[in-house]
Image: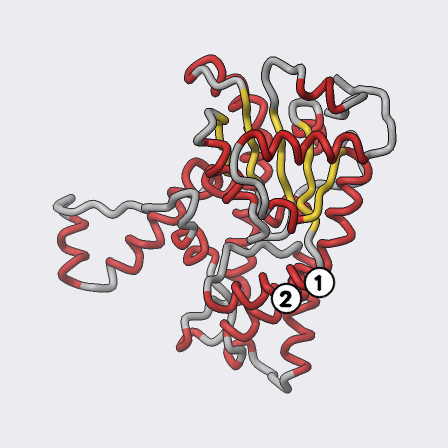
Amino acid sequence: MLFASADQFRALPGRAVTVFGMAGVGKTRLGNILRKADWFHFSVDFRIGTRHMGEYIVDNFKREAMKVPFLAELLRSDSISIASNLSFDNLDPLSSYLGTPGNPAKGGLTFAEYQRRQEQHRVAEIYALLDVPYFIGRAKDLYGYDNFLCDTGGSLIEVLDPNDPEDPVVKALTQNTALLYLRGTEADAQRLIDRFKSNPKPMYYPPDFLIAKWEQFKQLHGLRRDDDVDPDAFAIWGFEALLRDRLPRYQALADNFGYQVDAAELSGVRDEHDFMELMCRAIADRPAVAASL
């Protein structure tokens, strides 16, 4: 949705906003703030890890438990159950399932298995994003929420074409929500890279990009075999490369279909009023457009 003015956005009886940008830039923090003000917080990563990949995640837990004879016997007799405690703020079950390719002695997956799980994530993310219109209606009809925030993962930009208004994901989001890009700076990027080193998040790479970077990493470090790759080293290096590759595509999505604010401005948002002021400034700062409502 695009608006003729900020006043038009303010006057809506119910608002739906999709926030996007680098992983860790503050989208989920914003969702936590607005949830306290009776906004429905739709986390795409949570939807992926529960509805669309939950069975994969739990089966992986069970596969590991079956390697322990004591636990294996209890699982076979249905004496114990295993579940994922994934939450909006804890995506570790999804991260652990996606894993990282490399040396199996260091917890790495084979490259082929990593690619298989990446494809599962790609499909799951598309489905989760296409769920947005349904959840806007569900939030209103079932729970009485007038306002809706779609909190996307950093890989949103990998499952849509930011220049194609007919892209299915673009259509689902732009026809039902206003898009807001939380634009990071180089300093933000470095901060997120440093944070990723200590707290990795789920990562999705476009297939061709993944293959190219995998081979490039091995060449840079003089490695001939996949099993020689340190999984943690590749994860950090790959995250930095992917983050910077995404930035111009985030910008294209904002330029074509939405609004933008600097991520630093989000740090000043403490409640719904602050967010509304931020959103209205973003609408006012965009060149005049005919409303798409």
The dot on residue 186 is 1
Q: Residue at x 60, y 34 (%)?
A: 275
Q: Residue at x 56, y 33 (%)?
A: 150
**Nearer to me, 79 or 7:** 7
Q: Locate residue 21, reporting x and y percent.
A: 65, 47
Q: Locate residue 182, reporting x and y percent.
A: 66, 45
How is the model colour-coded?
secondary structure
Q: Residue at x 57, y 30 (%)?
A: 273
Give the position of the N terminus as an image quadrant.
top right
Judge whether 128 appears above or below 89 on screen. Answer: above
Judge whether 282 appears above or below 223 on screen. Answer: above
**Nearer to me, 38 or 111:** 38
**Nearer to me, 46 or 274:** 274
Element marked by disc 1? helix
Q: Residue at x 42, y 47 (%)?
A: 89
What residue would you read off at disc 2?
A: 190
- In the image, what residue type sits under mark 2? Gln
Mark 1: few, some, or many residues within 10 Å (few <14, many ≥20)?
few
